[in-house]
Image (cartoon, rainbow, N blue to C red):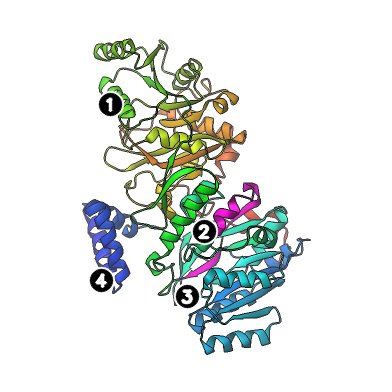
Amino acid sequence: MKSAITNIMITARAFMWLLLPNRLKLKKARIIYKYGGIRLCWHCMVYKFSVRVLSYDPFRNQLSISQSKYILEKCTFKPLISIVVPVHKVARKWLDKCIRSVVNQHYSKWELILVDDASGQEDLRQLMDKWVSKDERIRVCYLEENSGIAGATNLGIKHAKGEFIGLLDHDDELTPDALTWITWALKKNPEALWLYSDEDLITPNGKCHDPRFKPDFSPEFLLSNMYTCHFRVYAAEILAKIGYLRKGFDGSQDHDLALRLSEIVPKEKVIHIPRVLYHWREIPGSAATSIDAKPKASSAGRRAVADALKRRNVKGKVASHEICPTIYRIKFEPSEFPKVSIVIPIKDALSSTKKCIDSARKHTNYPCFEIVVINNASDDIGLLKYLRKEQSENRIKVIDYNKSFNHSEMNNIATASVESEFVLFMNNDIEIISEEWLEQLVAITELDDSIAVVGGLISYPNGMVQHGGVIFGLNGTAGHAHKYIFNEMPGYLGRLHTLQEMSGITAALALVRRSCFDHVGGFNSNRYPTLFNDVDLCIRLRNKGYRCIYNPMVRAIHHETKTRPVKLEELVYKQRLVSDYAEILNRDPFYNPNLALNNEQFREYRQLPIEDQIPELADIPEGA
């Protein structure tokens, strides 16, 4: 009864939403229906209109003027920050709010460069001239012919005197503490060359909502999504080095810039500030309202990503996601084909095992792989007959393991028996459903030698997500990103269908670089023989500087029961994981400290007290 009432409420909210006159909403609904039918429409309705506690308050954790003053006094390095704003075809009131948001900054060492890109609006010129007369830190450059965002921004950057350049759109706003956070981040990271923050949307009547809480920097994620977006601040020297923004990428000029920067700026010099410092205005014509407002953005973005792959000598084909055209799916092609050993631990279960092996073979043309089955004392006559036949035909290699089930030790033994450059760990209840899946996994390892583990999108048989990468800290230990949402939905910030770095990958389907695996001693068969052995492995790999990558182009079904009782054994290993890695589990760089830890769907928020990020604020005297 409760479920029926909930469904009725969701349907009613969805119809009310559709009744509000907005052709972009109807177009979006049609796209969703065309792509995924009624089923996808229903899941989108559930996700958008089900009852949720979204306790987002954009002002709750902003720095006060006194707090900003206190911490800025501790900053010996106070750079001049130049804010560049291209101005073209915007309502006077939005530009005024934009300028005021800079003037009202707690940090005072800034300059604002407004570039009138042949707007032809006398009211805008009067407004800008008025502000110039009121504040000597504001300057205006005028273009007689329209140069587009790239050309206007470049002119502003060339006139900038600051050591750091911040980019702001003419109808958006900065929070009053934005430049204080930038300055503080530079104090903590003096080598930083590129900083970006979280953002939210702001309605025409000034209501802030829908915060975009981002992960720390992942160059792989940037290939699929211009997620660093707002607010971004760059060292002037690094912008000059790459030649600023390029023309010809209108709508995705910032993505092209970020991709080029990511090729010369080391990851450790890209700093994410997990605070909303930017309000993105929702008005007609803004991409904040709908990407359809920038029809050229997706094609320009695809070209920018394809261009990046070409510069990096990486083979791959770029396509837009059907629902989110500025989310890019990349089908990579390996340039080499090192040998891969597919390791499958089994005990009985002929049907599952055969389906697993058949699917692995069916969906790849990879020329150099072997299948190694490690048999844990199976007594299923049918299975044993199948194994003997496959082995006699040299289609698989079988290793017998006649001890109590120890998933870690079984995988370690199987790995020690092969000489392949890569080992792919696969549960025997996995069914591969995507073409060229093995090619896709291996190709990712060619992006960077530090990539040790690659996994894919794993769903339950009913189409709900089981695994979209591992997130540390969820429900006290670790969880799977986007678990239990429909696998055709975009996910939070489009992350379900984007290439990206994650803190961990499930061993149910994971390609592992053999040298990295050996470097950390493989799975810990003593401390984690059955559960959380993959989390433990990924943590130890990351501690050595290796990385884990999630590639949603690889898809599989896990024929595991969706609901199963929590056994005492699982609680024991959870406690063990917390005991071993409490500090690491407490801070997943690829989640966000503003997102709740009580679910795996990126729903709800948690408080991130300013003092947690800036402990020095705890020293402010009473009444200061």
Q: Find residue 260 and report its image quarter.
A: bottom right
Residue at image point 65% right, 75% down: 112
For the question of whether residue 117 can be seen, the reply is: yes
Could you classify mark 3 by the number of other residues whose Cα lies within 10 Å: few (under 14), some (14-19), or many (20 or more)?
A: few
Residue 270 belongs to magenta span = yes
Could you classify mark 1 by the number of other residues whose Cα lies within 10 Å: few (under 14), some (14-19), or many (20 or more)?
A: some
Write down the residue under mark 3: 206
- Label 2 or label 3, whichever lies nearer to me, is 2
Disc 1 element: helix
Q: Is residue 352 above or below residue 200?
A: above
Could you classify mark 2 by the number of other residues whose Cα lies within 10 Å: few (under 14), some (14-19), or many (20 or more)?
A: many
**Residues at circles 4 and 2 in contact by the CB criterion of under 8 Å:** no
Amino acid type, label 4: Leu
Q: Name which of mark 2 and mark 1 comes first in the sequence.
A: 2
- Label 4 or label 2, whichever lies nearer to me, is 2
Q: Name which of mark 4 and mark 1 comes first in the sequence.
A: 4
Q: Name which of mark 3 and mark 1 comes first in the sequence.
A: 3
Q: Position of residue 66 (x, y in %)?
A: 69, 69
For residue 19, the mark is 4
Write down the residue under mark 2: 255
> For this view, does 438 lie left or right of residue 30?
right
Q: Name which of mark 4 and mark 2 comes first in the sequence.
A: 4
Write down the residue under mark 1: 355
Q: Which residues are magenta?
A: 257-281
Q: Is residue 509 above or below residue 26?
A: above
Q: Name which of mark 3 and mark 4 comes first in the sequence.
A: 4
Q: Position of residue 52 (x, y in %)?
A: 37, 57
For residue 480, the mark is none
Q: Find residue 428 and report its image quarter.
A: top left
Residue at image point 64% right, 48% down: 266
